[in-house]
Image: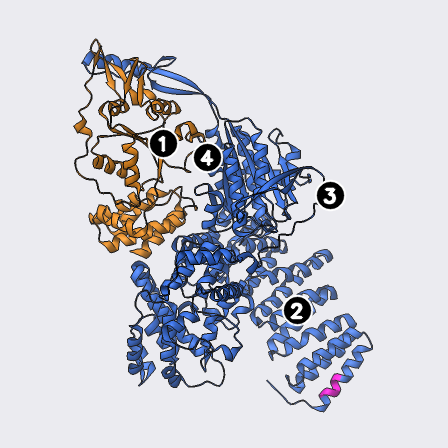
Chain colours: A blue, B orange
Amino acid sequence: MRVPIHEWEVDLLVSQTIAALTMATSFGEAVAHGFLRLLGQVSPEQLHGYARRLDEVRREGAGLGQLLAAYLPAVLLRHDDALLEAFEATLATLLSKGVYTVKGPLGLFVQLLDRGEADAGVALLDLLEACFALPLSYNRSIYMTQFIPQAVAGFDPLRRSFQIGQLKRVIQVDHHLAEPFVEGLAAGTTLLSAAALTAFVSRALNRAATSAEGAGRYLSLAAHRARAFCRELQTTVPLTEVRGQLGRYLQARLGYSVAIHDMADLGGADDHMDRPRTLVACDGRYLFLPKELGLYEQPHRNREVYTLLVKLEAACFEFGSFDFDRQRMHQLSGSPLDRGAARDGAVGSDLERFLNGFPQPDLAAGLFTVFEHCRLRLAVAARYPGLARETASFMEQAVAEELALDSKSEILKLLYITVALGMVDERIHRIAGDNWPLLLQWMQTAVDRLVPGSRVEASAALVRSAYPSVEARRGRPAAPRRPFWTPFGRRLRPDLIYRATAIPDRMARRVRQLLASRGLRVFQSDLRKCFLRRQGTPENADLRALILAAHTELNLAASASKIRLELAELDLDALLDRTSAAALPSRSMSGTHHRYPEWDAHLGDYLMGHTLVRERRLPEVSDPLYRRTVDRHTGLVARIRHAFELLKPQGLKLLRPWREGDSFDYRAMLAFAVDRKAGCMPSDRLYVKRIKHQRDVAVLLLVDLSRSTANQVQGASMSVLHVTQTAIILFCEALKIVGDRFAIAGFSSSGRLDVDYLRIKDFDDPLDHQTKRRIAAMTPMRATRMGAAIRHATRRLAEIPAGVRLLLILGDGFPNDTGYKGMRAIADTRRAIQEAHARRIYTRGITVNIGSDARLDELYGRAHHTVIQDVRDLPDRLFEIYGRLTRT
Amino acid sequence: MASADADAPVSHRITDEPYYLSIGNEVSLFEAAARSALPVMLKGPTGCGKTRFVEYMAWRLGRPLITVACHEDLFASDLIGRYLLKNDETLWLDGPLTQAVRMGAICYLDEVVEARKDTTVVIHPLTDNRRTLFIDKRREVIPATAGFQLVISYNPGYQSLLKDLKQSTRQRFVALNFDYPAAHQEAEIVARESGVEPNTAQALVRLGGQIRNIREHGLTEGASTRLLIYAGQMMTQGISPADACRVAICLPLSDDERLQETLSELVDDLF
């Protein structure tokens, strides 16, 4: 609502502001801001009402006046008398306890109104009124003025309104149940729908009549029955529950890992998304899904939607939707290379530049989604008939629902349904109007050109052909339109793709230009993909393969030897700024120092005495982490102990029936006598033999303490190192049972002359308080010069007399340090492992928190390492690996 | 004391050509080793064709083949032979290794690391220039008949460290490395061995490849070519592709329910 501003209103602003300023500067500022928000937005009566209210509260003091001056405009701007009345009533209730109760709770209320969450705002007023009408002590009142805003601010925005309502119910019964209720939300009840949460709270409150403590345990989900009932009621599926499964599917299907993130991580990049219906987005590097999914009443259906979305997006990776290349486009259609570049100053990805070359880039982008999804549908149908069937049934349902809801003839939507989804629906013909059959026929002929094996550029070529007729039909809208409808909001997002791939794209461009100057051709999109997969560190062999492939595709002659020669002269590290290998001066340090050589893959030789390892004890910290971890994982500890009991040598092993031994096996003797009597050939296995059974294993656990281990584990509030510590503690408990000798050490580095080898437990150390405190003291440090650390660990392990010596290397990625990156670091680490092997020390790499990567095979040797994508599986998997390695 | 007749060589002869698709130069390498009477070690994951290769080479070289599946209770005497009682007489029965030495056969010790360590020692004199087998109970030294060749198979990386082959054993063999064949070759093998259509074989091979991509996610090894063939054979018996893959590939690979769900998703996509 916009109303004219009168002079008297400005006078009122001035007089009220001056009156407030006489009391306090901040009050005056708040009044001025309040009037400025209201002027021209509310009626003269409302403005007078605001001034009157300020006159009243001035009598109560500047503090309250300032708050009201700031909060009341947000209410008045809603033009809702009922809301104003509720606000005043709540304010009165709060003031009955004291002015100190106003700021926090009503501050949040105003924030909710400003964010457009009016329903939640109203629910909050109800809650505040119900709570502060109770006979609360002074201290409890103060506590609640902080607790309620903090709790409500943490509720999920989509569920905030009804969750506040349930908090009110709980507080009305017993305000001491408020905390368990909020704990319960964090533990899982937040996923319940309004009706389900009501049912859950009702059941909890029934218990309150007999035991407030019992009701609290129920609400906080501490009670087993509460958890079971919550699971029964829950229809929404959280992403955390399915992320591991979906990640594994992507790894299987694509052969490399694609991380799955919460859609909220897209941040401001999804501003123009059609939010309620956009359930998936992809930037060519990561996949984004909603934090939770509650489309259906049945949880398994929601899980199916998650899976389907991942399967569909996997096709974009598999069939190269993100690999658009202007050079290939040029080859395909002969179009000028720089169309679109001039328009946008060559900013953005190749795809964006291509789309920006059209008068309406949004229409071109829409058409691109239509044709590209059509290409993907055909490719999926050819390779995955089962997936194609599954997709079709989901899509049919989504389209039927959309057409029933909406009869508007948005041309892109209709094209998407008919071309991208390949569906024929009579309603579309009715909606589309007269020219539709002609357009559709043209589209069909065009799409028939998309043979299996077509690349993404074929879709772009279709955009160019179809654009004029589609634009003629749609016209030129005055304002940008909202994105057109697609099932689940799936569409290709060139802006996201560029954001995620800008850096590798720039690197790819530089390499392509350099190669071109040497007469070698390579496609920039291939290079970009290689940079992405190799995490910015492609090798000459990768480039060689890409160049050969490009020359073959372009029918250009190039001998492998010429390419090899050109690449040998190319300083890739310098080109990509990968080296800054200046030797760092050694700093003054305590502990013993050891020099080790380092393998230089380029030189093909060792650099003698190149690294300096400082060995020292990790200082202890007084943190009861060890005890706490064992207590928290009581069940797992018991299971591990049981499993390791089976590995434990039993002293003597009984073998029967045996051909020689210490005594007769009487059962075998009986069988012998019977066989002999019967004239059959009797067995000679007549003895029992007892053999001594010994394990002679020494294991050193070498833990990467690099900075990256401080990273949070996705979907959990703990770091990678924290989970690693948990695994180490449980591992100690297990080895205590089995009796194998073991040591633990950490490593970190900052340049070749500054490699720390931190002893946490030596082979001869008992598992005492000092050791436990050192485990708790493990902390993320600096970089990862793995080769030097392995050489030193090998030296320590080689000193131990044992039949089997095992070095377990626990890390979260690849070696990386100053002047120690990419293939150089991998080659040196691999060499250090080979040196260990030569000394009869077996190594096993355990890499956590990353997907499988072929380079791990290069690092540790194939079948000599294990990837644990979800670090939370580490405690379980560590025992499985160790058990398998050392079973007798 | 009597001596049992050795089995007639004909019972160990392979008369029909086993199907084997050569992947590289392994056939010529094996032939060269056979001509030089060198023992051979076949390295590779389970079900990638090691046993079939030995059968094929035995047929190609026209030699009998004696196969022993090694296990943790396999003693030296199980390989060499032993005395048995028959009525009031003792009877010597040659073990498979002795039979092979006498008849000039290829003796194939499958998964040799599974056998007890003392068994590997008895094969040492057979794997160097002595080419003899010593039978301690009979105080007899048997020189290997021309044509005798020892072949062992070994699955590196998936064994317990406590069971790894000793260097003194390893360094007596010529080693051939095996892996899963390239996709087009594997599809040809699956189609030939199971009788399924080429398209179905390609889908099975794609499934195998995808499962191998998650080898590190709880699978000790990826899906073997043998399992893919089994699935194809089930399909030719009229079992639906989804069921065939589930019983022949997914369930044998893992007991992990979550992993089974992923495998099922992969199967459902493809068929």
Query: For the residue carrying disc 3, how many other residues have a C-alpha within 10 Å: few (<14), some (14-19), or many (20+)?
Result: few
How far apart in space, not on screen, are marks 3 and 2 (Cα)?
A: 65 Å
Q: Secondary structure at mark 4?
A: helix
Q: Is residue B46 left or right of residue A322?
A: left
Q: Are marks 1 and 3 on the same chain?
A: no
In percent of width and height, residue B118 lies at 38, 22
Up the image or down, A697 lies above or below B228; here it is: above
On residue A588, which mark appears? 3
Query: For the residue carrying disc 1, how many other residues have a C-alpha within 10 Å: few (<14), some (14-19), or many (20+)?
Result: some
- Front position among marks 1 and 3: 1
The C terminus of chain A, quarter of image: top left
Which residue carries the number 1 mark?
B173
Which residue carries the number 4 mark?
A885
Q: Secondary structure at mark 1?
A: loop
Q: Label 3 is placed on what type of residue? A: Ser
Q: Which residues are magenta?
A: A9-13
Q: Is residue A102 visible?
A: no
Between residues A53 and A645, which one lies in front from this camera angle? Answer: A645
Q: Earlier in the sequence, mark 4 or mark 2?
A: 2
Q: Secondary structure at mark 3?
A: loop
Which residue carries the number 2 mark?
A90
